[in-house]
Amino acid sequence: MTSSARRSGTKGVARADREAQILDVAGRIFGERGFAATSVADVAREAGISKPLIYHYFGSKEGLFERCLSEASGVLVGEIERTAGLGEVGLARALATLDGVFAVLAGRTWIWQVANDPTAPATPAAATLLGSYRTRLETLAHDGVRELLALGGVDDPLDVDAMAAVWSNVFAALVDWWCAHPDVVPDEMSARCARLFGAVFRPAAP
């Protein structure tokens, strides 16, 4: 189908539906290439629409990215808050968190990549979104680690802070690894994490 044929179908589409289509395409491209290497023309071409329509809806490339970032960060934090509310404690909570994230990212790993794009624009709106996202993740990480360490009788605030930093990096590394291996389905990755955690935290033999 030619670009002109695709564009002819944009008339009569509800704005909310058209925005959702553009955000889906833009999110995927931003995720694959990063904000800096993506142009509005790239998104328009992939979505089969005109560049002016994107500017009309989102104002700028930065505005388009900010909408994608808002959706991405909301999905991730919402899922981690959901698993935090399951009542799991310690390693069970860690595995539940990873399992939920793998499931929600299935088929749309761009969500994770957009939320962690090192080339994200330094606009006030993007900075606010990223700041809120990271603060909420840090709070959830501290809550989980505090519960885990309490099981071993550890309650020193600096110990909790240090371990939360370790967990945040392990969590990000595992999700990054999974995103780089698209042939690994969520259930397989969850099982891998369970094996790895089991091996690392298994008590050493006398």
Image (spheres, rainbow, N blue to C red):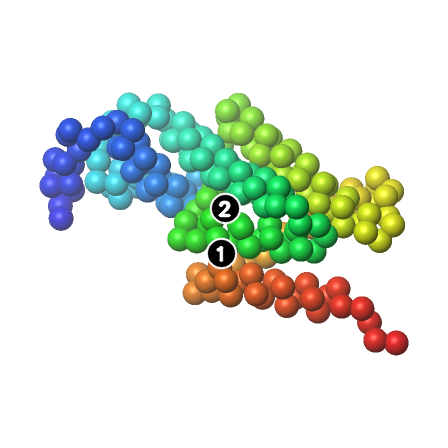
Instruction: Give left or right: position of 94 versus 120.
Output: right
Say which mark, if any, is on residue 179.
Answer: 1
Callout 1: 10 Å neighbours few (<14), some, many (20+)? some
Determine the secondary structure under disc 2: helix
Residue 152: horizontal and vertical position, in percent? 84, 53
* Residue 63 in the image: above or below residue 194: above
Q: Residue at x 63, y 64 (%)?
A: 194
Q: Amino acid at mark 1?
A: Cys
Q: Residue at x 53, y 43 (%)?
A: 79
Residue 102: horizontal and vertical position, in percent? 51, 54
Callout 2: 10 Å neighbours few (<14), some, many (20+)? many
Between 128 and 102, the residue placed more toward the observer is 102
Distance between the alpha carbons at the discs numbered 2 and 1:
8 Å
Quarter of the image holding residue 36?
A: top left
Instruction: Give left or right: position of 2 versus 22.
Output: left
Instruction: Give left or right: position of 19 versus 183.
Output: left
Residue 26: horizontal and vertical position, in percent? 35, 40
Determine the secondary structure under disc 1: helix
Q: Is residue 39 visible?
A: no
Q: Residue at x 50, y 62 (%)?
A: 187
Q: Which part of the image, by quadrant, shows the C terminus?
A: bottom right
Say which mark, if any, is on residue 169.
Answer: none
Q: Residue at x 49, y 39 (%)?
A: 75
Q: Amino acid at mark 2?
A: Trp
* Mark count: 2
Say which mark, if any, is on residue 112.
Answer: 2
